């Protein structure tokens, strides 16, 4: 599977919006490719993971065009939150170590802002906390809440990091019964890892000098 070059091409194997958010960087562990290059990319991603609907995204796009500086600020905050979230998730769920205090502080700041100006609304037979729909920071606030939900739930222990072939680093929610998931996707990193093992086995089984070019006489 080819490496995504745009947010539209990005696969979503995380199993949770917060994890798909931290995965908006391709080949994170080697030569990172940034996929959140504009506020529009942030909106496109939010629609794809169903944090906002298309109508809300269109409305926010119009607001962003009138306030490009504010939109750029939200994007910068989103990227800072994403990197902080990745550091915290890797430390707590993958490495079983204390999370960086700075990164936790960033998450707390954005989570504290997530409920500012929000209101309780009835959704079917339950109440939900609805942020202001025309706020440019809406996608960021929804991500912060999703991240807080993950960090405070038993699902945190199910977060894994793709083994890949050394260049992926994506996070995912392992829903297998025996917690055996190793890759972000079987047709992507899983396939590449199997091909690499096949190549290494073949290389090890060849006699010395096999495959070398004949010397010229």
Image (tube, grey):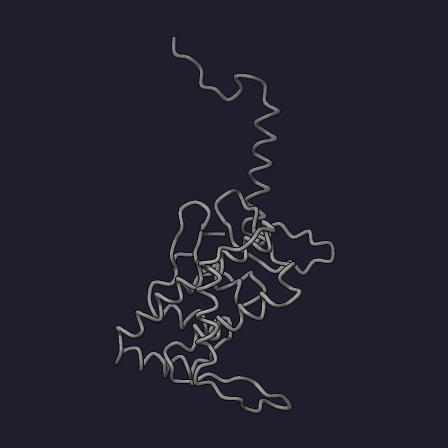
- Pinpoint residue 98: horizontal percent, then vertical percent: 56, 53
Up/down of 2 relative to 122, above or below: above
- Pinpoint residue 86: horizontal percent, then vertical percent: 49, 57
In the rendered view, does 181 fall on the left or right side of 38?
right
Q: What quarter of the picture does the C terminus occupy?
A: top left
Which residue does the image show at 54% across and 51% down from the upper left? 188
Up/down of 1 relative to 16, above or below: above
Of residues 73 and 34, the one drawn nearer to the viewer in this rendering: 73
Toward the top, the furthest residue is 217
Of residues 147 and 58, the one drawn nearer to the viewer in this rendering: 147
In the rendered view, does 66 fall on the left or right side of 110?
left
In the rendered view, does 198 fall on the left or right side of 117?
right
- Pinpoint residue 162: horizontal percent, then vertical percent: 56, 50
In the rendered view, does 72 fall on the left or right side of 170?
left
Quadrant hosting residue 13: bottom right
Up/down of 65 relative to 95, above or below: below
Up/down of 104 relative to 139, above or below: above
- Pinpoint residue 5: horizontal percent, then vertical percent: 39, 57
Which residue does the image show at 51% across and 63% down from the upper left? 20
Toward the front, the furthest residue is 101
Which residue does the image show at 55% across and 46% down from the upper left? 164
Which residue does the image show at 56% across and 34% down from the upper left? 199
């Amino acid at each position: 599977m080819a490496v995504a070059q745009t947010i539209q091409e990005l696969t979503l194997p995380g199993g949770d919006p917060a994890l798909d958010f931290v995965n908006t960087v391709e080949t994170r562990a080697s030569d990172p490719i940034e996929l959140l290059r504009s506020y529009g990319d942030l909106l496109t991603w939010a629609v794809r993971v169903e944090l906002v609907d298309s109508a809300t995204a269109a409305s926010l796009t119009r607001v962003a065009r009138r306030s490009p500086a504010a939109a750029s600020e939200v994007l910068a905050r989103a990227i800072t939150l994403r990197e902080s979230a990745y550091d915290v998730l890797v430390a707590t769920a993958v490495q079983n170590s204390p999370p960086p205090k700075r990164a936790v502080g960033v998450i707390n700041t954005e989570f504290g802002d997530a409920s500012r100006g929000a209101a309780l609304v009835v959704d079917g037979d339950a109440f939900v906390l609805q942020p202001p729909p025309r706020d440019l920071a809406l996608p960021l606030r929804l991500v912060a809440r999703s991240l807080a939900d993950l960090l405070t739930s038993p699902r945190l222990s199910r977060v894994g990091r793709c083994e890949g072939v050394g260049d992926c680093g994506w996070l995912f929610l392992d829903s297998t019964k025996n917690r055996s998931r190793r890759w972000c996707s079987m047709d992507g990193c899983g396939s590449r890892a199997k091909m690499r093992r096949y190549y290494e086995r073949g290389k090890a089984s060849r006699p010395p000098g096999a495959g070398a070019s004949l010397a010229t006489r």
